[in-house]
Amino acid sequence: MRISTFWELMAHEFGSGYSKVLARDLVMAEVGDRTAVEALDAGIDPKQVWFALCKAQEIPQDRWWGPDKEPKS
């Protein structure tokens, strides 16, 4: 996943304003006790960061891939 795709998914799920706040403020154990921004800056795969954020925010799995997209095998 590209970082641009990560931000598109964030904006779709949380809105353009709140997604930036969430990415900056929510610390997730799954990515080394980092925020999404810190994890991305540290070089962690954006897909891993996105999934960690989905889990932390209890987003239903059927929405993890964004609108109208099926999980890739």
Image: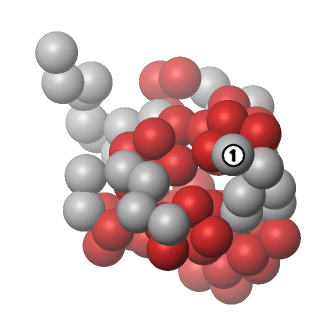
Q: Quadrant of residue 17?
A: bottom right
Give the residue displayed 25% in from the left and 26% down from the top: 70
User: Which residue is depicted at the point 52% across and 37% down?
Assistant: 51
Q: Mark 1 points at which residue?
A: 32
Q: From this viewpoint, is residue 1 visible?
A: yes
Question: In the image, is 21 to the left or to the right of 2?
Answer: right
Q: In which quarter of the image is residue 14?
A: bottom right
Q: How many labels does the image show?
A: 1
- Left or right: residue 52 compared with residue 72: right
Q: Residue furthest bottom?
A: 17
Whether residue 15 is situated above or below residue 63 in the rendered picture: below
Give the residue drawn at x 66%, y 79%: 20
Question: Is any atom of residue 15 visible in this view?
Answer: no
Give the image location of residue 69, x and y in percent.
Answer: 25, 36
Q: In which quarter of the image is the C terminus?
A: top left
* Amino acid found under the numbered disc labelled 1: Gly
Q: Is mark 1 on a helix, strand or loop?
A: loop
Expressed as whole percent of the image width and height from the top left, the position of residue 4 reads: 30, 73
Instruction: Using the image as rendered, state which of residue 58 and residue 27 is in the foreground.
Output: 27
Q: Judge the density around disc 1: few (<14), some (14-19), many (≥20) Cα neighbours within 10 Å.
A: few
Who is closer to the viewer here, 63 or 24?
Answer: 24
Q: Which residue lies furthest to the top in this view?
A: 73
> Residue 56's quadrant in the figure?
top right
Q: In this view, does 26 lie above or below 4?
A: above
Q: Which residue is drawn at 49% across and 74% down?
A: 41
Q: Is 53 left or right of 63, judged from the image as shown?
A: right
From the viewer's side, name the closer residue of 36 and 10.
36
Color theme of the render? secondary structure
Which percent across, then down, holds residue 72?
18, 24
